Image (tube, rainbow, N blue to C red):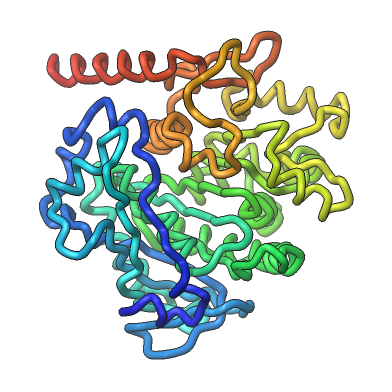
């Protein structure tokens, strides 16, 4: 299927593989050693869910801007690299610190399987369970994109992260209908608010109908405006359930807010208290000089954003709540700006979760192993409960990699 089939400005969109995470640089091709032979291909299948309008045959669906009440579920095929790229060459390109050539990302096919509530979703659940059966870690990772994102962008961005997660969980890209244009940001905000219920539906469906051991969520930028209220809505829909009951029912694991464009005040005062008790961990990355979130803040009448926080926007009880959750290892805030000395990587980019090889590495380790930040090579920011990337982060990861190798060798 051609990119033009998407009926978006897709023909002009060109996406390339993100920089290689530092952990992949250190481990090399060995990182994919446990990937089943049938999955060692440049053509990679990922799942998607969307509440965008659709047209065309189910085997070649087209998704446009706009919003519907339906939750459409399907499978997308994303190709990594130019046609005919051999797996061993893709392995090398996926583990090099620098690449001589770009690795293009292409959406080759889009096949819609189910549409809730028109169908039961049984076919989609069966496909997900089949994928989970091939994973060493049978978890689901839901990727929720930011503003100014087309269906193509949301799918390939989720797919590249899935590739660097060593394809070891089932990836579901939730493509809520942002317009793909910066000038229509306010419409994106409107659509994000309307899409939260659909995401809550998706989480409930996956928890009830799949064999996932846990369900993780990666929310990028304005995706936070979808994820945070969706998680709070899950508590609202189950008012009589205890936190333990809801935790066992939904099996929500790591919830990762990368440079989140969501109200800081609403997040801390309203959303977090509602969902923190029944998820395993919440991670927030922030940079106080994020230029993209500065513009977004202006569009929200100066309301501070979670990914660009202002301590003065929080009450003393808000701060105490965050510190309490941090001490319980339920809430981890990672400061992109702080460092005692200059670091070689760029931490200013709004898309640091995939553009910065240190941050992407940490996110991968968080989703795959759910370890404490200190066990992932991060350092406590002096005088706070926040974390940061120390200048010797690569050396720390190298030591962790060697430690794991030794542990495996001694088994």
- Seen as rendered, the residue at the extreme front is 100
Quadrant that contains the C terminus: top left
Is 254 situated above or below 47? above
Q: Residue at x 63, y 14 (%)?
A: 381
Image quadrant assignment for residue 26: top left
- Seen as rendered, the residue at the extreme bottom is 56
Q: State whether residue 379 appears in this view.
A: yes
Is 85 situated above or below 217? below
Q: State whether residue 235 appears in this view.
A: no
Residue 322 in the figure: left or right of residue 159: right
Quadrant that contains the N terminus: bottom left
Residue 210 in the figure: left or right of residue 268: left
Image quadrant assignment for residue 312: top right
Q: Residue at x 71, y 21 (%)?
A: 323
Q: Position of residue 5 (x, y in %)?
A: 40, 82
Q: Residue at x 13, y 18 (%)?
A: 409
Q: Nearer the viewer, residue 37 or 128?
A: 37
Tally of marks: 0
Residue 356 in the figure: left or right of residue 329: left
Image quadrant assignment for residue 42: bottom left
Q: Nearer the viewer, residue 5 or 377?
A: 5
Q: Nearer the viewer, residue 177 or 232?
A: 177
Q: Position of residue 150 (x, y in %)?
A: 53, 68
Residue 348 in the figure: left or right of residue 316: left
Q: Position of residue 255 (x, y in %)?
A: 54, 42
Q: Position of residue 316 (x, y in %)?
A: 87, 24
């Amino acid at each position: 299927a051609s990119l033009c089939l998407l009926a978006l400005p897709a023909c002009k969109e060109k996406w390339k593989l993100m920089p290689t995470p530092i952990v992949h640089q250190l481990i090399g091709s060995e990182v994919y050693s446990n990937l089943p032979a049938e999955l060692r291909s440049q053509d990679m299948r990922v799942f998607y869910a969307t509440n965008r309008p659709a047209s065309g045959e189910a085997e070649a669906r087209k998704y446009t801007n706009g919003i519907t009440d339906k939750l459409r579920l399907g499978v997308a095929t994303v190709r990594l690299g130019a046609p005919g790229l051999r797996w061993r060459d893709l392995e090398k390109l996926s583990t090099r610190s620098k690449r001589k050539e770009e690795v293009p990302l292409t959406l080759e096919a889009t096949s819609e399987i189910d549409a809730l509530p028109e169908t039961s979703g049984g076919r989609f659940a069966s496909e997900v369970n089949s994928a989970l059966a091939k994973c060493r870690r049978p978890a689901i990772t839901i990727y929720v994109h930011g503003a100014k994102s087309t269906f193509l962008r949301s799918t390939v961005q989720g797919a590249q992260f899935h590739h660097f997660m060593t394809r070891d969980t089932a990836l579901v890209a939730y493509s809520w209908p942002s317009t793909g244009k910066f000038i229509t940001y306010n419409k994106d905000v409107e659509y994000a608010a309307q899409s939260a219920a659909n995401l809550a539906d998706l989480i409930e469906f996956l928890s009830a109908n799949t064999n996932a051991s846990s369900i993780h969520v990666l929310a990028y930028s304005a995706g936070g405006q979808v994820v945070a209220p969706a998680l709070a809505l899950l508590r609202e829909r189950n008012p009589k359930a205890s936190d333990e009951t809801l935790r066992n029912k939904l099996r929500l694991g790591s919830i990762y807010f990368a440079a989140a464009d969501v109200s800081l005040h609403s997040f801390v005062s309203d959303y977090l208290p509602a969902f923190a008790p029944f998820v395993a961990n919440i991670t927030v990355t922030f940079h106080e000089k994020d230029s993209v979130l500065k513009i977004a803040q202006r569009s929200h009448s100066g309301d501070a954003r979670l990914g660009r926080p202002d301590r003065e926007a929080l009450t003393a009880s808000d701060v105490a709540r965050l510190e309490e959750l941090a001490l319980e290892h339920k809430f981890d805030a990672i400061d992109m700006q702080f460092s005692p000395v200059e670091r070689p990587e760029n931490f200013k980019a709004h898309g640091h979760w995939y553009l910065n090889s240190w941050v992407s590495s940490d996110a991968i380790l968080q989703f795959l192993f759910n370890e404490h930040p200190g066990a992932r090579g991060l350092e406590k920011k002096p005088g706070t409960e926040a974390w940061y990337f120390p200048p010797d982060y690569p050396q720390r990861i190298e030591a962790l990699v060697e430690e794991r190798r030794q542990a495996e060798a001694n088994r």
